[in-house]
Image (tube, rainbow, N blue to C red):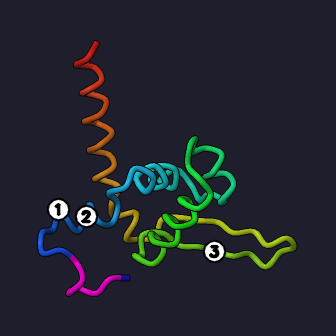
């Protein structure tokens, strides 16, 4: 997780730094529904490479946006879910969904 000194001075830039990539937003969209396993995310996020998904999940976990739970099974099962901090971004995602829906309607 970044320290306060490492974050941009602008709050909007801070938010963009946390979730600004296309893939992070789509990962969050999925995790708002339920916890997901790595291969489920990879299959659902068409076009994402394994490396980009791994890097995005690691970054989001380091930033405290998601949690990674490893279940002691054979083979091991790992699930990703939104943390409380990630859940607090729900209004941002809702606003983006509303805006996107209205924009698409305006193009009809």
* Residue count near mark 2 (Cα–Cα under 10 Å), binned few <14, some 14–19, many ≥20: some
Contact, mark 1 vs mark 2 (Cβ under 8 Å): yes
- Residue 90 quadrant: bottom left
Give the quadrant of the N terminus: bottom left
Q: The C terminus lies in which quarter of the figure?
A: top left
Name the residue that disc number 2 marks.
15
Element marked by disc 3: strand
Q: Residue furthest right?
A: 74
Q: Please tell me whether mark 3 or mark 1 is closer to you in this view.
A: 1
Q: Is residue 9 left or right of residue 62?
A: left
Residue 29 is left or right of residue 104, and the answer is right
The span picked out in magenta is: 2-7
Question: Residue 3 shows which numbered tag?
Answer: none
Q: Residue at x 51, y 50 (%)?
A: 30
Seen at 85% across and 70% down, the residue is 75
Residue 38 within the segment the image draws in magenta: no
Q: Which residue matches tag 1?
A: 12
Disc 2 versus disc 3: distance between alpha carbons? 25 Å
* Label 3, residues with CA under 10 Å away: few <14, some 14-19, many ≥20: few
Give the SS element for disc 2.
helix
Identify which residue is drawn at 69% across, 55% down.
39
Mark nearer the viewer, 2 or 3: 2
Indicate which disc, 3 or 1, sits on the residue closer to the N terminus. 1
Residue that mark 3 sits on: 69
The residue tagged with tag 1: helix, strand or loop? helix
Q: Is residue 37 left or right of residue 3?
A: right
Quarter where residue 47 is shown:
top right
Of 57 and 34, which appears nearest the observer?
A: 57
Query: Residue 13's spot in the image, x, y percent?
Result: 19, 64
Residue at (35% x, 60% y) in the render: 19
Separation of disc 3 and disc 1 at Cα? 30 Å
């Amino acid at each position: 997780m970044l320290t306060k000194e490492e974050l941009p001075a602008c709050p909007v830039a801070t938010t963009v730094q946390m979730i600004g990539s296309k893939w992070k937003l789509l990962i969050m969209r999925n995790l708002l529904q339920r916890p997901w396993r790595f291969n489920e995310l990879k299959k659902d996020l068409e076009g994402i490479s394994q490396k980009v998904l791994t890097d995005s999940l690691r970054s989001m976990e380091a930033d405290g946006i998601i949690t990674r739970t490893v279940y002691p099974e054979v083979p091991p099962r790992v699930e990703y879910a939104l943390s409380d901090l990630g859940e607090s971004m729900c209004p941002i995602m809702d606003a983006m969904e509303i805006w996107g829906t209205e924009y698409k309607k305006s193009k009809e």
